[in-house]
Amino acid sequence: MYNRENGNIRICLITPGHIATNPRLIKEAEALLEAGYKVHIIFTQYMDYLLTDDEQLLLKYPGLTYNRLNWVKKKNLLRISSGVVQKLSQGLLKAFTKCTTLHKITLNRHYLWQYWQALKIEADLYIAHNSGALAIAADAARKKNARFGFDAEDFHREEGLSNTERESLVHIENLYIPFASHLTAASALIGKAYEKIYLKQFITILNVFPKQQFKKKTDEKDRALQLFWFSQTIGTGRGLENIIEAMSLLEDKSPVLHLLGDVSLKMKVEIEQFLLNKGLKKENLIFYDPVFPDKIFEMATNFDIGIASELSVPLNRNICLTNKIFTYIQAGLAVVASDTSAQTDLFRQYPNMGGLYQNSDMHSLSNLLKNYQLFPERLVKAKQYNIWLGENLFNWDLEKIKFLDTLKSNFKL
């Protein structure tokens, strides 16, 4: 796929946070490098436990160039000063509602640092990953007489933001998106939501991953159902309460829920207590510390069912297709998903992936789990079907072709 002509084109990818928590950016960077493009990344770091993961990714792709800003330590002068500037910006917006600079800093406390780094790069295309990076990409492109793009990982204005954050986000998106030359979205419904506002086409690039080479397990006999759920952070308001409640409705309360992600001691105790209050035992729940993203797939093969428990509010959760559901598919798990609009659309096309449950009715989720308890052969069939989907349809090996094609049209290659 390497193209010698692409070597003259430099693309700068920008995210306000860690690269380890932005698999879309990393997959794009890898695809671009493979295709012969020069790739530069601008990012910041603020969570201590992710520093090692960031470093491993940078070592994995020696062809990358990058600028990073580490503001992890709580007493770090940079952390304190940037926080003060952001708070002042948010306060001043009450009097100066149309001041674009204040809106930029409200969305991204390190806007100025990232913008200055972007100006040092002679890029042909700057791509913003989320709205906090949009102004940086657009401003740098304008200054450098280049182009800029925006990857809508979410429908950001409907993420449950504060009024101030939402006003700033809408201001920035309205100012820049109409002029972007490269627009992508993580689901068809997110793309449609933006298209209704800006009347510009968004290309859907799904949150899929490269084909997985390790052996998937489809037939684990004589054991309790092993349920899997993961996220960057484990907390309430993510559908976990619904899963535990559904488990408690089963006559056979043997299923085990495995949770992977960063969790505070207070939240862990709260979830465990909720579990016990529902008549379940501590043995029904196992927590795992975060692992390097590439390790999640191999870990997932030890389980039976991946649960995509997205809630229907805020609106973004209703229309997104997260990397969670595609991780389950590509790891060869049966998928049990809540009936959000995006997940419902996916199941209409591929009903054999597993089962869809009603967010408002925990009996529907409980019945799905019971069905797999009573008919394990159905579980095996769903796993086998998802292995096929991961190999033949939902994988980055195919999806990246669509991504690269959007760039070719952008540069008329």
Image (cartoon, helix red, strand yellow):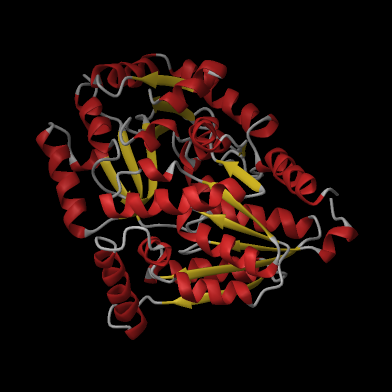
Provide residue 253's location: percent of width, then percent of height.
23, 27
Residue 221 shows in the view? no
Write down the quadrant of residue 225 in the picture. Answer: top left
Residue at left offset 41%, top offset 26%: 336
**Residue placed furthest toward the right:** 4
Q: Is residue 192 above or below residue 232?
A: above
Q: On the picture, is 65 further left or further right than 114?
A: right
Residue at left offset 46%, top offset 27%: 342
**Residue placed furthest toward the bottom:** 77
Q: Is residue 229 above or below residue 55?
A: above
Residue 174 shows in the view? yes
Provide residue 164's location: percent of width, then percent of height.
28, 54
Q: On the picture, is 94 further left or further right than 111?
A: left
Residue at left offset 58%, top offset 25%: 384
Provide residue 36's location: percent of width, then percent of height.
81, 60
Provide residue 239's location: percent of width, then percent of height.
29, 35
